[in-house]
Image (cartoon, rainbow, N blue to C red):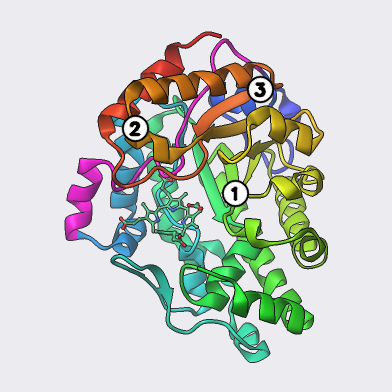
Amino acid sequence: MGEAAHENIGVGVKSSSKFIDALRGERGETSPMWMMRQAGRYLPEYRALREHNSMLQMVMTPELACEVTLQPLRRFPLDAAIIFADILTPLIGMGINLEFKKGEGPVIDNPVRSAKDVANLRVPTPQENVGYTLDAIRMVVSELRGKTPLIGFCGAPFTLACYLIQGESPGDLEYTKGLMVGDPETWRALQLKLVKLSADYLVAQVEAGCESLQIFDSWLGYVGPREYDRFVEPYLHALVDEVRSRVSVPVVFFATSVAGLFPRLSKLSVDAFGVDWRVSLPQARALLGRDTPLQGNLDPQILAGPWEYIRSSAQAILDEGRGLPAHVFNLGHGILPHTPVENVERLVEFVRSYRA
Ligand code: 1CP
């Protein structure tokens, strides 16, 4: 890396890494690999810790978050770690009551539904809000000793608003879209607060030692092009542009079911796009109309299937990846709790050794 990449605030890429190189558009002999939700319930050692600690306790205790972040790396030779946190934890400091309920996922018992609710939301500094995650990042980085880069992340302003407004895992978005189209001023005020919260959070994660960032817009696939242009794009661009002006690490944007939005998303000033399994990598490239490194896109649901099927799917993706400017192998969405660990082990070994 040249010095130019470091000049913004003096933090930037430290370790030489196949993963960071690929995000910068440099293609090596093999595709580097990590897996979304690579720390999680499919690992027995994660379940063992989880038996005695709630999800939030694990995120809020730096020693535990550090340990859980490192668990998948002890088992598999992955090319990146991702800090154990959640896109929703930074919302707690805004004044919402977040709980992860067994079987239900995240629940917010004081959802945001009015102009007054939005006005009451605080935007604390990352240090006062999520100091526990910043501490965990520093611990992980010191354990990794420059050998493996750590990914920091946040939820995009649209997806965070979905959770804040719906108050639970959004099965549908009727409250969210009702507010968005019915009260655009309040929507704007909420989006601007979320842009500020997330931009500061991403920058703080880089300052604590993260060498790459990923923005998750998990619910964007529910948005049509007209609403994207008016209610989503200005804030997503504001977040990305703000972060880029302050740090120089590569930024990946990930959303699912957004093939129809790819021509618009390609205007985002990110280094790479994460792709889900509903489109092929060449299709995604054509729709984006831009030569950008892509990350993806094995369907995590087929990891429950026979090895031969998994292997041939992974091979097809790696072959497609050879046609891209650069490719990071990943799943098309998070790994599922019942995934056999043995299949993951074989997959990582296969991806590491495969040469197209
Ligand atoms: O043990 C448990 O019961 C907790 C399950 C769990 C885990 C392991 C949740 C609850 N969050 C996490 C960690 C997490 N979440 C990470 C870091 C770990 C890693 O990747 O190794 C990351 C990056 C996330 C991101 C996240 N959380 C997203 C974006 C990615 C995606 O899946 O689309 C979203 C939407 C969430 C919300 C969330 N948190 C937890 C659940 C079950 C959910 C999804 C609920 C829903 O479908 O709405």
100, 145: nearer the viewer: 100
Query: Circle 2 sits on which residue?
Result: 305
Report the mark closest to the observer, 1 or 2: 2
Asked if 167 appears above or below 131 in the picture, the reply is below
In the rendered structure, which amino acid carries the disc numbered 3? Ala
Question: At x 55% / y 74%, what residue is drawn?
Answer: 164
Query: Circle 3 sits on which residue?
Result: 326
Ligand 1 within 8 Å, label 1 CB? yes
Q: Secondary structure at mark 1?
A: loop
The C terminus, quarter of image: top right
What range is drawn magenta here?
A: 27-52
Q: Secondary structure at mark 3?
A: loop
How crowded pointer 1 is (Cα within 10 Å; few <14, some 14-19, many 20+) is rated as many
Secondary structure mostly taken by the magenta-highlighted segment of the chain: loop
In the rendered structure, which amino acid carries the disc numbered 1? Thr
Q: Secondary structure at mark 2?
A: loop
Query: Circle 1 sits on which residue?
Result: 256
Answer yes or no: is residue 17 visible.
Answer: no
- Where's residue 144, x and y in %? 39, 31
134, 319: nearer the viewer: 319
- Where's residue 334, x and y in %? 45, 45
The number of numbered discs placed on residues in the rendered structure image is 3
